[in-house]
Structures are given as C-alpha cells and as structure tokens.
Amino acid sequence: MDYVQITDSQRQQMLATIGAGSIEELLRDIPPDVRLGRPLDLPAGLTEQEARRAVRELAGESRGADRLACFAGGGAYDHYIPAVVDALASQGQFLTAYTPYQAEASQGSLQAFFEFQTLICQLTGLDVANASLYEGASALAEAVLMAVDDTGHRRVVLAEPLHPHYRRVVQTYMADLPVECVVVPAKAGQADLDALRTALTDDLAALVVQSPNFYGLIERQLPVLAEAVHAAGGAMVQVFDPISLAILRRPGSQGVDVAVGEGQPLGIPLSFGGPYLGLFACRQQYVRRVPGRLIGQTTDAQGHRAFCLTLQTREQHIRRAKATSNICTNQGLMALRAAIYLAAIGPHGLANVATVSLQRAHALARRIGELPGYALPFGDQPFFREFVVRCPTGAVDRLFDAGAERGLLPGVKLGAFDESLADCVLVACTEKRTEAEMDALVTLLAEVGR
Amino acid sequence: MDYVQITDSQRQQMLATIGAGSIEELLRDIPPDVRLGRPLDLPAGLTEQEARRAVRELAGESRGADRLACFAGGGAYDHYIPAVVDALASQGQFLTAYTPYQAEASQGSLQAFFEFQTLICQLTGLDVANASLYEGASALAEAVLMAVDDTGHRRVVLAEPLHPHYRRVVQTYMADLPVECVVVPAKAGQADLDALRTALTDDLAALVVQSPNFYGLIERQLPVLAEAVHAAGGAMVQVFDPISLAILRRPGSQGVDVAVGEGQPLGIPLSFGGPYLGLFACRQQYVRRVPGRLIGQTTDAQGHRAFCLTLQTREQHIRRAKATSNICTNQGLMALRAAIYLAAIGPHGLANVATVSLQRAHALARRIGELPGYALPFGDQPFFREFVVRCPTGAVDRLFDAGAERGLLPGVKLGAFDESLADCVLVACTEKRTEAEMDALVTLLAEVGR
Amino acid sequence: MNAPTEPTIFEKSCPGSNPGRYVPAAEGPTPAELLGPAGAELLADAPPPLPEMGELQVVRHYTHLATRNFSVDANFYPLGSCTMKYNPRVNEWAAAQSGLADLHPLTPAPLAQGALRLMFELSRDLAEIAGLHATTLNPAAGAHGELTALKVIIAYHQSRGQKRTKVLTPDSAHGTNPASCTVCGRSAVPVKSRPDGRIDLDDLAAKLDDQTAALMITNPNTLGLFERDICRAAELVHQAGAQLYLDGANMNAILGLARPGDFGADAMHFNLHKTFSTPHGGGGPGAGPVAVAEHLAPFLPTPQVVQREGRYELDWDRPDSIGMVRSFAGQFGMFVRAWTYIRCLGPAGLKRASETAVLNANYLAAKLRSLLPLPHELPCMHEFVLSAQRPGQDDRGLAGRIAKRLIDFGIHPPTVYFPLIVPEALMVEPTETESLAMLDSFVAALAEIVRELESNPVVLDHAPHHATVAKVDEVAAARSPVLRWQ
Amino acid sequence: MNAPTEPTIFEKSCPGSNPGRYVPAAEGPTPAELLGPAGAELLADAPPPLPEMGELQVVRHYTHLATRNFSVDANFYPLGSCTMKYNPRVNEWAAAQSGLADLHPLTPAPLAQGALRLMFELSRDLAEIAGLHATTLNPAAGAHGELTALKVIIAYHQSRGQKRTKVLTPDSAHGTNPASCTVCGRSAVPVKSRPDGRIDLDDLAAKLDDQTAALMITNPNTLGLFERDICRAAELVHQAGAQLYLDGANMNAILGLARPGDFGADAMHFNLHKTFSTPHGGGGPGAGPVAVAEHLAPFLPTPQVVQREGRYELDWDRPDSIGMVRSFAGQFGMFVRAWTYIRCLGPAGLKRASETAVLNANYLAAKLRSLLPLPHELPCMHEFVLSAQRPGQDDRGLAGRIAKRLIDFGIHPPTVYFPLIVPEALMVEPTETESLAMLDSFVAALAEIVRELESNPVVLDHAPHHATVAKVDEVAAARSPVLRWQ
Ligand SMILES: Cc1ncc(COP(=O)(O)O)c(C=O)c1O
Ligand SMILES: Cc1ncc(COP(=O)(O)O)c(C=O)c1O
C-alpha cells in the first residue's frame, strides 16, 4: 500500500516536460558512490488489511487501561475522556493543517489555540499562556531557561519531591549552560522550607516547586516560598496538575510567576507517554520572553475580529540564534484536545473529576493504611489523588505480578526512581476507578501482604 | 447524562414569555387520566463514563469477527473495510443531516448520492439506480411490487436457491395482496430451468433469481431465463452480490430488468445484521415507478451544476396512497459508505477483493472436499466465494462448539433454514481470511470429523 | 470557501492511479481457471468502469462534500416531524465497538449474548415507554414499522376471520400512513380534522365500519397538538372492532409523560432516529421498532429476541407470525445507539427531554406568532405549524421562499407544505437540545425575513444568496431527469 | 457558508447549562473535610471561570472552526520544508487501538511488550533508513532532536576532553538550527552558500577549527538541492575533529536512494511528521527521533528501548547518557503511525515515495520557471525555491502577496521568505501524494496570478478575497498583543 497517485504514463509525460529521460537523471546530484545500491533492509510492504492485522497483534501484546484497571499515575493519569473529544479533534481539517503561518487560511486552528490560551489562563490565574510546548518536563526546562534569561541569574533551585523525569530533564537542559542547578531534598514528603530558604541566594534565577508534588501531596508553602524567591530576585516556578486546579488554589493567587504542567489529564490518551501537552503560563512581565507560539487577536481588513501568530520576533524562524527557544513544531492537536475537553466538561464537570478523584484516593488510602503490613509514609499530610504506600518488604514485585493476573495495575513502583523507596508504590485514583476495582486492589494488597 | 442546555432560570424566563406558570400548564391537553403518574420503569440514568463501561461489558459478551475468524456468509460478508471509509463517513456534516429536501443546504449529500447511483449503474450495467432501500430482502420485495404494478400481472415466481430470508420477506409483502407467489425448488443447487420454464406462464409479473445463489453457485441460465420471462411479459429480477460484479457478468448484459442486492459487502460493518444497504437498479423504462429517493442533476440560478431530489411525484410525501412505495427514511449513510468504499478501492481493488475471495474459497473447498467424511454436494458447479459442505452426521454442532474455542466461526448452519440440510454448513471465504485461519478451519473439520 | 461546483468522482478519475492495495493482490489461478469450462460465459469481459483515484483524492472529495451540507452538528435544524436533536458522540463510539460492529448476523446465540441482551433490553424499554406489551425491533424505519404493524393488525383480524379492507388516516397524516396502507393492499380513507386541528370525531364515527382494519393516528399530531379526545377516539375504534395504530413519530413530546398504550393504542412504531437520538445520516438509516398490545403479540414478525433461562436467543418459531419483513434482525447499529441513549438519560432524563422539547416549542411559537399566522391555539407540544399565508395576501409559495432565505442565515428551514391542511405550512420543531440563544437567533432571523418581505421582497425570491449554490432548478431536474453521471 | 466571525467559546458560555455529567457527581465528604485543617488554605474559593455550554454547542463550535482551516485533507498544501503529504487514515486507526492508546507510560515492561516491540522495530528501521547505528525515539520534534543530538555530540567531545564552543550552520539553514545551538550554550556560526545554492567549502574550511563541535547541514538543503560536495564536507568536518549533523527535515527526498550515514553524517534527526506521514495537527505533535553512528550511541538519552533475550524493555541504566530530554519515552502515538506507514510502504514504497516527490517537484519547477525566477538550476530534489523578486522590479513583499492570493484559489501558500538567502522566496514542496491534475491546477493558479500582476496588481494587494476572513492585520496584533479573551 502506498499513496502515490502518479501513473506510469503520467510519469513519462512529466519527465518529458522536465526534459529528463528518467527519474535517475533527476537524482544525478547525489554522488554515485553514496547511492544505496540495494533495497532498504525492511520488511516488504503490506496491504492495509495486513497492516491492520499486524497492528492488532502488537496492540494485543500490551495491556492498556481498558484491560488493566490503572492505579498508576506519576505524571500521567487515566481520567475519563468524553467521546466528543475524539470525535471533534479528529476532524481532518484540524488534523492535517500545520502551524498557522497564513492566518487567513487558518482561522479555525488560530481561534482554537487562542481559546486554549485563555482557558489555561483561567485555570492557572496567570496572565499569559502559550499555545503549547512538548510536554510537562521540557516545559519546565523552558520555564527555567526563561527565568535565567530574564533575571540574568545563574542559580536554579529544584525543590524535591519533584517528578524525577522533570528533574532530569532540567538537568540535561542546563548541563551545557553556565547555570548551577541545585536539588534540595524533600522533608517528610514535602518541599523542605528551611533548606530551601537557605538555598535561595541572591543569584537565584528560579525556584521550582511541584504541587501536587511527585508523592501526590499538596505543597502548603507556595506563598511563603514565592515571597522568598522574589526577595532573592528570582522567579517562582510551579509545576502544576491541571485537574487539581478545579479545586486547589491557582498559581496566580499563590505568588507563582511561571506555571508549567503536563496537560495529558485534559482529555489526552495515555498512549504510553505521548504525544502529551506542555502547559506554560506566566505573568504579563514575561510576555516577550515566552517560548513557543502565541496567538493574538486582531482584525482583518474589513474590521472583523481575526487571529494570528504574534510576537514572532521571539521565535527561531525570525530571530534564529537569538530566539527565546528553539521550539518550532509544538503540540497543537493536543492543545485542541485539551480545549475541547475543558469546553465539554465545563467547570462543574472538572470539579467533579477533581473531587471524585480526591475522594476515591482518600477512601482508598484509608483502607490501604489499615491493612496489616502496609503504611502510608505521608498519610498525615494533605494529598490530591495520589499517595505513597509502603509495602511489606519484598512484596512490590509480587503485587504487580498478581495484579496483572487480576487485571490490575496497582500503581507505580517507586524503587525505579529512588532505591530507598524500593518497597514503595505510588498509587493514583481517578474518577474512572470503580468501587469494584478499588475493592479488588485492597484485596490484592491484603492477600499479597499476608 | 442528558443533552438539555436550557438552565433553570431560562426555563422560568421562557415560561414567562409564553405566559405559563409551569411546564405542567403546557401539557394540559393531555387528559389527566392518561398522564403517567410515575417514573418510567427503566434503569436510572448513567454518566457517560458509566454508559461506556456498560457498553463495553455488552460488547465483551459477544464475539465479533475481530475475535472469531468469520467463515460465515449467507447474505452478510466479512470483507475488508478500508480505514478511510469510517473516517470519511463519520463526518458530522454527513452523519447529522437528513433527507436533502432543501437542495441548497444539502449539496454534499445530494452529490454523494448522485455519485452512488452512478456507481451502482456502473456495477450492474443498468440504467437507473435509486439512492438506497433498507436492505437486500425488502429491496427485492419492492422490486417485485414494482414489477406487479408495471406489468399488471399477478404471478411472481421465486427460483430457489434463493436466500430464505429474501423468500420469506417477499412472501410477507405479498401476503395481503392479490398476488400469487410461486416458489420453484432448486435442482442440484441451481435454479431448475425446466421447472421454471413451466412456471413462467403469461400472467407473469416477475421471475426472481439470485446469483450467486444462496448456496454460493453462479447461476448459468440467466440469459435463457430472461428470454423466457420477457416472452411471458414479465420482468426478470436478479438478486446480485455487489462484490461478485467486479468479475462476473453484469445484470444489464444478461437480460435482467431489475437488479437488487445487499450492499453490506461494500464497506458496511457486519453489525449483527444492520444497518445495511438495499441496492436497487433497473432499466430506464421503470424510471417513474422506482421506489425510494432519486437524485437528479440540474443547475442553480447561476447556471452551475447542482443536484436535487427528483421525480418526487413517485413518493409518499407527494402522492400518499398512490406512491410507488411507502419508503421515506432510507439508508443514506450506508449509501455514502458504499460510495466511499468503491471510490477508495477502485475497480482494480474490487477485482482483487472478488478474485482473492474466489481463490481462497476454491482452495478451501478443495481441501475440505478431500477430508474424509466431508462432501461438497455442489462441488462440481461454479461458485463464487461460498459453498455448501456436508459434514459427518451429527458433527455440525460439535464443529461450532469446538470452533468457538479456537476462535473460528466455521460458517452458517443450514439446518436452521432447511431441515434436509441439517448436516450442512455454508462456508464463505473473503479476502480477509488468512492461510493460517484456513488451515485452522481445515484442522478443526478434520479433527471433529474423526 | 466552497466552490460553486465540486467535480464528481468520475471527473476526478485517473486511470491507473489506484492499484487498490487495501487487500492482497490476486495471485495464482485466475477465476476463469477456477470456474472451469463454465467460467467463460459467467465472467465479465472487463471490470466495471468505476472511477480510479488515490486515497488523498477520495479524502479531499468527501471532505469537500461534507462542507456542502447543513447538519445538526453545524446548524440549527428545526425540521418539523423529524426531531433533529443532538446525536451524542458516545453513541457513535458505542456502535463501533468490536463485539457489536463486527458481529456476523448469523453468529450462534451463545456467541452473541451481548448483542442479544442489548436487543432484549431495548425491546423491553420501548414496551415500557409505549405502555404496551411486546416490541419487534425488525422494522428498518418508521414507514417500515407502519407496514409491519398493519400486517400484524391484518393478521389479527384474519385470525378472527375478518378481512377488513380499509384503514382510516386523518387528513393531517404523514404521507407514509396512506402509502403503507396501499402496500398492504388496504385502502386509505381520510378522516377530517376539526378547525382546532384535532381529529373530527363525528367524521371518524361516520367512517368507521366493519371493514375498517384500523385508525392510524399521530399523537401529538402533525400540527404538534395533543389529540385531546384520543381516549374517545380509541373507544370508537374499538367499538367498531378496529385497532388503534399510533404513528410514534412525535414520541419526543411525551416520553414519561403519557404512554400510547395507556391512551388506547394497540400498536405503534417508534422512530429511533427521531426520539432516541440516532443520527439521520443524510436520509437514513433509521429504525422503526413496533410495540403492540398483548393480543397482537403473536403476530409480530420473526425473529423475535427472547430470554430463556437467563440466556438470550432469536425465536424463529412463531406460528402466528406475519413472517419476516427484512433479512436478519434489524438495524442493530441503531439499537446500540438508542440503548446507550436510554441508559444515559434514564427515566428522569427522558422526561426532562420531552418537557424541554415542549417548552422550547411553546417559547418559539409564542415569539413567532406575531410574525406569521399561527393557525392553531397554543399550547402546542414539541412542535407547531406556522402558516405563511397571511390574511388577505397572495402568498402562494411564500413558505418556500422563507425557507430558502433562512438558509442565508445558516439555519436549516423548517418542514414546508406539510401537513397539507395548513396553507403555506412551516412546521417548526426545535427539539430539547437547543440553547435559548439559538432559539432567539432563529426568532431574530425570521423577524428579519418578515421585515424584508415588506421592504425588499425580491431578496426572498432569489434566495439563497450565501449558500454553496444558488436556488436550484427542481423543475428542470424532473423535466428531463439526469440520474447518473455520464 | 462561513460567517466572518465565529464567537468564542467564552461568548457562547451560558452559566448553568453544563452540569458536567460525563463522570460521577461528587458525593460524600468534601475536599475541605478530607484535606483536614490544612484544607482551607489550599482550596480555591471558587472553581476556575471556565465557559459552560452543552455538548451540542461544543460540537457546533469545533465543527465551525474546522471549516475555517485549510488542510491537506481539503487543500493542496505545498508548504516547503514541511512535507505536507497525505496522512493515511489507517495510521489514525492504529494509534487509537486499545493496548496502545490506553497504555500507561509506566506500565511494567512485561505488560507493554507490544508497545516496546513497536518502538524497537521503529528505532531499527530508522537506523537502517539513516545508514546509522542506533536511534533514540525520545525527541518530541525536529528542533528537539537537534537539541538532543547537539547534546550527544557535546557529550562525545567532552568524553574526549574537549569543550568545543561553536557549531557551524549554513546561511540557508532553518531557524531551529542556530536556535538549538544557543539552547545548548554553543554559538552558531554561519557558513556561506555558493551561488549554486550549495555550501561554500572554502568558507566551511575557513571556519572549521578545534572549537567547532559540529556542522549542522540539511541535505537536500533548504533550497531543495542535494549537496553535491557532501562527502568532501564530511571529510573536512571530520578532519577538524568535529561531527557532521544532518538535519533530516528533507529526508522525503532520499528514502532508499541515499543514506546520511553513507555520505558522512554522524548524527541526524528525522521528522516523523514530515517524512513518515504523521499528521501535523495544526502545529504538532511531531516526533524527532535521532539516529547516530556507533561512537555517539553511548551518549543517547534515556530511556532507550532494548531487546534482551527476546523481551523488550526500556534501558534507563546508561552511564554515559546525556540524561532525559523529556518525560517518559517519546511521542508514542506518532511512533505507531510511522511504524504503520513504514510497514505499509515497505522498502519499495518508500523509495517510490521519494522518487515521486522528486519527480513532482521537478515537474512543477519546470512548469513554473517561466512564470517566476528560479534562482537555482534544476534538477532539484523534492522541493524548490522560486523568487518573487523579478529582475529590475521593485517586488518587495510580492512573495507575501502571491501567497495571500493563492488562498483565493483554494491552495495553501508555499513557505515564504525562507530560506533567507533567496529574496522573496516561495518554497514549493508538492510531495509525492498529489495527483498530476492537482499539480497542473497549481500551475494554472500561479499563471493566473502572474497575469493579474501585470493586468490588475491591486487584486493581489487586497487578497485574499474569498477566505473566511480578509487580510489579517498582523502588525496591529504585535503592537498591542491581546493573547486571551477578556
Ligand atoms: C409523522 C410521521 N410518520 C411517519 C414517518 C415515516 O418515518 P420514516 O421516515 O422513519 O420511515 C415520518 C417521517 O418523517 C413522520 O414524520
Ligand atoms: C529544515 C528544517 N529543520 C528543522 C525543522 C524543525 O523541525 P520541527 O518543526 O519538527 O521542530 C524544520 C521544520 O519546519 C525544518 O524545515
């Protein structure tokens, strides 16, 4: 199966128009000695029918949330996606357009992204949001880069518990730059206020705090930290969870300057880690330093409202080496999905999602905490929809093996991130998890714990 | 979950505009004693999330062709449906429009159906095709009714082997009419030429022959029969299979006057029997008697080509009791699917579908015919993609039970249609059946037959 | 951005551009070889002359065509009698699930329990909504349901030794009612409507006799009015030994409020594509299940879904049945959608849907009656009929002109010229799923058009002005029909 | 049928119209109760001020917006450097399959074998197509791939004790190339192009030194020309101890014809959204896998998909790795599409795709060179750059005006004003999936526009005339930015 429409006789006719005897002649600029003299070593082409079989086979070799009740979180959550999101986002005119360089031919995407920017501002309580970055972790790296550029400072402080992927990505991004990246360990599962205060010296570019943090706890000290950050001349950066903002205080009201997050929970499939959606919002002061596309409102020649890419002088295609970021292709379709999700579910629906997730997570935590052999190391602190469970020594692998047999994914093994947590599992609960599934998980834990 | 958008306060405002105190007041024309004084006895409403779970549960209680290699045919076939068919036919502007009464607001559907009519003419070699009927069997009944009206004759001859559902539907339709419906039994799996000749008396309204017939055999005597039918002043009606016409002689070249068929194989899901697609094509002479919608080409006020419903004086909404049929809602979306299927797969693709199905069916028949205990009662006659297998006495049920365990649906049990064929299975093979599945079926038969 | 003309797929065809590699290419023995000596005369000389194009061309073609339609998804679509409510996307998801969409219709019952359970439950739900005893899901649409039910009624009469050759239909009835009578070999006899838009009981009584098989009545009727005397009408019908058939096209007005069985109907059809939100698909498919009272149940067509010892199956063995009315067991994909819809809404949601449909219609009627004559008194039920025949004016064709002009406002026109008893009828059915803002913008559009009618009527004559095409010449189309591309 | 203005979702909002019943309603203890004493200060006083509307309103809104876009599905879209080829629908089906779409990224490897196998096979396939040793799938897009590869190269140099502070990029390079250098703390140094559009080897040699980390080159380059001296360039680069990085945005020209590894590249990125047919989504997502030679492989980011004893897993334990460049393992949904595409086409199909892309570009170039200046000699590869700067004319802004006018013909404009070295550049990339008829109609449209330029240039100044909106005022937008609805 291929998608070429030119026929053999047309090819001849076209070659004649070109004045070439063969396609080979058109390829004459490729030095003969680097021409590939053999077919690529790939499996032979399939018919569409065969390709579908092959995909179905692959899909059958993995067990997604449809077949494995998903208590895993750790940065990606199995929230309910209304059917209308798939139906609307898959419309070909959205799917197969590209970056709206030509505003007059792209009002649909432009308006959708403008609305997306507004929705993210509404959610975060901040002034400006861009039209998406790749995903949460690299969005954080971009935020830190922006703070470094803006402040001219060179010290970046990362408050644990920060999602380890996010920490590592920031470290990778900073590795080749004259920036010092300080990681301040957590204390009792939360950012360590005292240690952080000490770390916030006056060459501070940014402090990064995640809330709800990697262990699911809601950080209580954001306003206090923000004050200290501002005193040090730095930017307060929060990694947020968009669902949590249906009920939790918004970054804009907590002294946060730049809020970044993973937009996946907003109607985007788990899809083994991507494509996801980097959310980026900040205060007005940074508007000319924002990375990525920005859509602006303007008018057309007849005075009608219209939208276009704007402040493009920030961007690589205009400013090249002096751009505020190197990003070009972004996550437009995912931004569209998030916008459709928010429009469909609405503020009350989003509050339901957040509240029911929180309620179920708390109910589940309580039950697990009562199981002999299990403990909730941070059980006394406020958490959103995710919590750490300490299991009987050596039980974690058995838990996952037995879970797989019963159609349960019990959570995320924390040992992979931190050896000291080898006996810990991070358990998340969304509104999709039923009582029956929660019962099954509790039973599983109880049995394995015996 | 419901889809009402009016809010409580709007309801009050609207009632005020109306001048009513309550919705109850608007319902005052319903006699109080027939008001339902209790809620309907139905399960309570679900959230969308719960409804999806409930559907998935139902779906899990059935085993479709994805999980059960389908050798069943008998009027519905598991042909490959290109992904593009689903994607294009599900566009909301096709899905949620209705009958194109207002031509200017419906050029999309109208052109698609006009093209569909043309495609069916191209396939059948006939002059006129309508924009769809419900499905194959009722389309046949409509064809017979048309022939009765056109000829003024009252005798309808059905040549077996005709699909039993089709026979029964024609009988139901004719039951209350002054029409005599004669069923002429098959001979050696084919229409019985001699018996039919005798039955074609000169009060003949129509002879109905299915080819490929219910046993999968290609009828050889269509032109001869057509001649006899015409001599008797009747109409020659063929029940055809649209896939077969990629390679078989077209009705229009065999003396057929009216060709009807089931359009399901043209890109329409099996979907447990519907919605399917009634195909109806005929010679020009019948154009003002055709049942159902017809789309015509015309021009708009600026002289541009445009399309509209036409010859509506045939139809119930104009002619009421004198209409040529009572049909109103038809199978528009299925006609659209068939058109997209044919446009995508093209003549070469359709020939591949037909030829590969035929080849696999023949290969499979040969192998089954060689198995001890099995016989092909009509194995010496030309067949398309379906054939009758006579199994060892009493083996049929075991075959289906064992097949289910191995993920195979071995075919259609003929005993349900004709007790004399209680040991027979109708086995169909499409291009989707793989060598591995065919091997598995042969192995199954061999093992059960031992 | 639409061009006035979109070339047809035939004009876009390019021979050789589509090798059709969706499926395996044919290799090995040719059909001629496999069919043996008979083959030659059976095989066509050449493949059918279908168009050829690559997949991108196909996608572009149908993407373009889609934008040349009005639809519920893009437009307000108050097409009376058609209940153009929102079609929830979750229903489409449901119908596409493996285990439903890919299920062969002759799959043995043990392997099709989910599908059969769905059908069983839907039958039961519809019987409850109808207030009747049993349901057949077989009929493919409303008209097919009428035909099926009439045959059931005829069979019932025949079982009692009666032929009964005629069927009464009000003059306001939908065209399918009389047409269905004809298809069943029965003559349709019109019954008059009273000035208040309800059936004339005197005329009914006069026409009922021992040859009357049934009265087919629509309630709420096609004027959107509830037949206040329905119980009396039922009594008269039953006294004459006839059956009361309810055309359920307007069930969206009375879900959970009143049940046809409770007001005397012996049989009725549903239109799942109206009341239960299955999409109209540019003309179909629909589904027309028929619910009947207990005395009619033995005559329902085959197959019938039944539950036996907790297992579901198709019952083919029904000695009194009228037989089959279609192949297989019905428009299953529509059942999945309707089942999902009924599950989502539940009893409270269904009732709220009808109440809101009635509210929206009365609101529109109250607003519009100052713009155009409203021949019948309010309240209406879920729809109402305006007349574009203003007193003392020559308004012939005005309903049609208003309809065309509405297209310029991005609104699909109401049903026009039906029912026949209202001159220049504009039949408006807003449904329960529209927003107040949309209802108000419809009012504003009609107000504007009525203003134009005074100030600049020629604007209406040449409407639509902003549609994909200008006014379409339907007369020319019928004069010399071109029914296929050539 | 498009209105000039579509109200925003905020303007359509109606408080109370959306109870949000997709998910269970919250019952039981409130968050404040559950969060305990700390709760009060953590919870917001009110929910965020999101818009409220029913599902039908949502559907209408996004249905309307969709029709306000040009797209490959509806329009010829010869946007140079972006490879706007057809995006097969079967790929969308594949990515939506359960087992792929619903797979949590932290699912233990034994339960994710299918997904991991797909990634492993895709990595291997891309390495084969690149002629290189190993691939990372992590990068989210081309620019992200550049950044990743530069970091790999830097790490490689560092492993040899070298810092190397600068990176050479031709003056024809895409903006992401120098921008990526900056993000990696390296200074981008431009290398001149020769009049024939290829890299100036003398300038290259002059600028290469022991501080040069790499040359980033695009081949075919952004003029659509194959760098004939690529092997010599590679030699010079390697002699200076630097690495040759290939920007693979233009791989659609050379699939199965020539491999970057074979002409000297040490590292390269692919754009799956260009070459391998994944849809562009109105700006993204894409995917930018990076393939590298063996000596660079140890430095690739984590995680890396590996096969061990027939099982697939993610390898996190890579001591020399640059670390992570994003969370989780990449744009998996794009991998599914690209894998499906590569499986469908196979080696023959991929080669045919490139050959046809080259054929189509040369055909268009041959036809168009009489209309507008073509600054560089043919043959081109898969694209070419016209100049709307006609000799002796003041044509400032003409490329932009032609672009806007093309919109009136239903054609998405080519890339304009890039590459920077061609004045008034119009960069045309037809791709292999277009029909000859479409290519010819593009030629006809440009011919018409060039005629207008003589006869009636004002038509161009005010274009577009038939788009959803008239010419958009981008200057005003940037002057006082309005970046959110208020
Ligand atoms: C009142 C009435 N009865 C019957 C029908 C026929 O239903 P269907 O179109 O489903 O066959 C309709 C359809 O429009 C109708 O409005
Ligand atoms: C030549 C070239 N290099 C790099 C890029 C950047 O790729 P991406 O947009 O995927 O980040 C592009 C994209 O347009 C390009 O054309």
Image (tube, coloured by chain):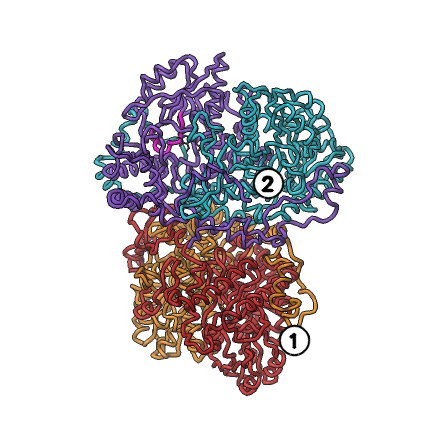
Chain colours: A orange, B cyan, C purple, D red
Numbered tag placed on residue A31 in the rendering: 1
The answer to whether residue A74 shows anywhere in this view is no
Q: Is residue B266 magenta?
A: no
Other-residue count near label 2 (Cα within 10 Å), few / some / many at <14 / 14–19 / ≥20 = many
Using the image as rendered, state which of residue A171 and residue B197 is in the foreground: B197
Q: CA distance from mark 2 to mark 1?
A: 51 Å
Q: Which chain letter goes with mark 1?
A: A
Residue A403, position as x, y percentages in the image:
53, 51
Q: Say few, some or many: other residues with alpha carbon within 10 Å of mark 1 (under 14 / 14 to 19 / 20 or more).
A: some
The answer to whether residue C463 is visible is yes
- For label 2, being within 8 Å of ligand 1 is answered no
Residue A192 in percent (x, y) is at 37, 69
At x 78% / y 35%, what residue is drawn? B372
The residue segment tinted magenta is C246-259
Q: Residue at x 66, y 27 (%)?
A: B415
**C253 part of magenta stretch:** yes
Which residue in the protein does label 2 denote? B265
Where residue D26 appears, x then y in whole percent? 35, 47
Task: Identify residue type, mark 1.
Answer: Pro
Q: Are marks 2 and 1 on the same chain?
A: no
Residue type at the position of mark 2: Pro
Percent of width and height locating residue D57: 36, 48
Q: Which corner quadrant of the image does residue A7 belong to?
A: bottom right
Relative depth, front residue between D217 and A306: A306
- Check the residue under mark 2 and report the chain it is in: B
Q: Answer with left or right where residue A370 lies relative to residue A197.
A: right
The residue that appears at 53% across and 78% down in the rendered structure is D154
Q: CB atoms at circles 2 and 1 under 8 Å apart?
A: no
